[in-house]
C-alpha cells in the first residue's frame, strides 16, 4: 500500500473524554512527583523508546539527518544525539504539561533565564507588527509563554489537536497567561488583522512546507520552507525576530549565532535533566535588510532558515531530528533536470553563502534527485526501501 493511500489514524470520538482524563491525570502526577523526578523518569522512557524495533525507521531517519548536518561526527556521537532527541522529546511532555502553571508574571524567573533579547526589544515595544519564529529546538512553547509573561501578547500559530477536550484545555491554560493560539487552518483571515493591530504573531517555522514551498538551504540541503512569513513581513514591514528557548545543561556554547555546535549529548545528559531554560534572540531581519535585495522573499526565507540552523547548532541534542524536514523536493529534482542556473544565482547572492557551501548544496541536490528517481521509477525487479528523510 502506498503512503498516500494510508489513512491517518484518528481516535474515536467516544475515547476523547477518557483520553483527556488520562492526560490530565498524568499532568497531575508530574506536579505531585516533582518536575525533576518526572524528567529523569521520562528521559529514561524516551531513550528506551528510541531503541525499540518498531521505531527503527524514525531512529534511522534521525541518524541520517544528523550525519548529513554534522559530517565530521563519528557514528557513536551521531547515534547518541539521535537517541538524545527522543529523551528530550519525552521530557518536553512533562514540561509542557505544567508550563502554564509556572509561567506567572512573578514565577517565570524560576525556570527561565533571559539571555540576549536586547536586539529585539525596540521591535517588541514600538507597537508595530512583528513576526516571531523558532524551530523544533529547545522548548518552543516556553518561548511564547515567557514572552507573554513579560507583557508581550503573543499570538502563536498552531495545528489544533484532534481531541477537542484536550484542545480546549490547551486554549484555556495558555490564554490565561497571555499566549493566544491561532488555528493554522483559519490563519489566512486572522493573521493580517492581528498584524494590522500591531500585535506580534509567532510561528514554528522549520516544518516541511510541501511541494509548493520555497526551497532554501537548511544545513546545506534544500528544504521546503513557508513563504507566508516572508510575504507577511514584506506586506506589513514587520521585522522577523528569530529566537529560541534552550535547555541549560552546562554545555559550553558561543554567543555568536554561527558558532560551532555544542559538545556531544552523552557528555551533557545528566545536566540537561533540569527544567531551566535560557531565552535568546539569534537574529532580527528588518525591512532595511531586504528592501534592496534582488529577491526579498528568497532572502528573508533563507535568512530565517539560517537562523534556525544556528539555534540547532547551539544545542543539537535538543532538536527533533526524527522529523521529515527535507521530505518535499524541488521540481528540478523530481523531474531529473540539472540544478537551475537561476537558483544558483539566488544562492550566490546571499551575503553569507560560500563557494564550499554552494558546492555542497548542489552535490546534495543531485544525490536527492537520484534517490527520488530510484524511489519513483524502480526497475522491474527492484525492491526500493522507503526514504527516511
Image: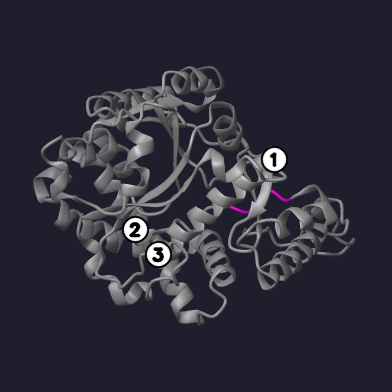
Circle on res. 193: none
Instruction: Say which element carries label 2.
Output: helix
Mark 2 or 3, closer to the camera: 3
**Where 282 falls versus 363 (above or below)?**
above
Identify the residue under disc 3.
314
Magenta-tinted stretch: 325-329
Viewer-proximal residue, 73 or 150? 150
Identify the residue under disc 2.
88
Q: Which of marks 1 and 3 is nearer the N terminus?
A: 1
Q: Is residue 53 left or right of residue 372?
A: left
Callout count: 3
Q: In this view, does 380 lie to the left or right of 218?
A: right
Q: Does residue 51 appear in this view?
A: no
Between the residue at mark 2 and the residue at mark 1, the CA separation in whole angstroms equals 30 Å
Magenta region includes residue 262 = no
Q: Which of marks 2 and 3 is nearer the N terminus?
A: 2
Identify the residue under disc 1.
4
Prevalent SS, magenta region? loop
Name the image quarter holding residue 296: top right
Between the residue at mark 1 and the residue at mark 3, the CA separation in whole angstroms equals 36 Å
Amino acid at each position: 500500500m502506498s503512503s498516500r493511500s494510508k489513512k491517518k489514524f484518528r481516535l474515536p470520538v467516544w475515547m476523547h473524554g477518557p483520553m483527556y482524563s488520562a492526560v490530565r491525570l498524568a499532568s497531575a502526577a508530574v506536579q505531585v512527583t516533582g518536575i525533576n523526578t518526572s524528567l529523569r523518569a521520562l528521559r529514561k522512557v524516551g531513550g528506551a523508546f528510541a531503541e525499540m524495533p518498531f521505531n527503527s525507521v524514525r531512529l534511522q531517519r534521525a541518524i541520517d539527518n544528523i550525519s548529513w548536518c554534522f559530517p565530521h561526527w563519528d557514528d557513536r556521537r551521531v547515534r547518541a544525539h539521535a537517541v538524545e532527541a527522543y529523551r528530550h522529546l519525552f521530557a518536553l511532555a512533562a514540561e509542557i504539561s505544567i508550563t502554564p502553571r509556572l509561567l506567572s508574571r512573578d514565577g517565570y524567573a524560576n525556570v527561565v533565564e533571559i539571555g540576549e533579547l536586547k536586539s529585539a526589544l525596540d521591535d517588541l515595544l514600538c507597537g508595530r507588527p512583528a513576526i516571531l519564529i523558532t524551530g523544533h529546538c529547545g522548548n518552543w512553547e516556553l518561548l511564547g509563554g515567557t514572552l507573554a509573561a513579560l507583557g508581550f501578547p503573543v499570538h502563536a500559530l498552531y495545528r489544533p489537536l484532534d481531541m477537542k477536550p484536550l484542545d480546549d484545555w490547551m486554549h484555556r491554560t495558555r490564554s490565561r497567561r497571555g499566549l493566544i493560539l491561532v488555528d493554522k487552518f483559519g490563519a489566512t483571515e486572522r493573521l493580517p488583522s492581528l498584524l494590522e493591530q500591531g500585535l506580534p504573531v509567532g510561528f514554528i517555522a522549520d516544518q516541511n512546507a510541501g511541494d509548493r514551498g520555497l526551497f532554501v538551504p537548511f544545513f546545506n540541503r534544500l528544504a521546503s520552507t513557508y513563504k507566508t512569513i516572508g510575504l507577511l513581513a514584506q506586506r506589513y514591514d514587520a521585522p522577523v525576530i528569530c529566537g529560541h528557548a534552550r535547555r541549560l545543561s552546562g554545555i559550553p556554547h558561543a554567543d555568536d549565532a554561527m558558532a560551532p555546535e555544542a559538545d556531544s549529548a552523552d557528555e551533557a545528559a545528566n545536566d540537561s535533566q533540569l527544567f531551566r531554560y535560557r531565552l535568546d534572540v539569534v537574529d532580527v531581519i528588518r525591512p532595511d535588510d531586504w528592501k534592496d535585495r534582488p529577491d526579498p522573499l528568497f532572502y528573508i526565507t533563507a535568512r530565517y532558515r539560517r537562523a534556525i540552523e544556528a539555534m540547532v547548532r547551539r544545542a543539537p541534542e535538543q532538536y527533533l531530528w526524527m522529523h521529515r524536514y527535507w521530505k518535499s523536493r524541488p521540481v528540478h529534482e523530481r523531474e531529473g533536470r540539472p540544478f537551475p542556473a537561476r537558483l544558483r544565482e539566488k544562492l550566490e547572492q546571499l551575503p553569507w553563502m560560500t563557494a564550499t557551501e554552494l558546492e555542497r548544496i548542489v552535490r546534495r541536490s543531485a544525490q536527492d534527485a537520484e534517490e527520488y528517481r530510484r524511489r519513483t521509477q524502480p526497475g522491474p525487479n527492484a525492491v526500493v526501501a522507503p526514504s527516511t528523510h
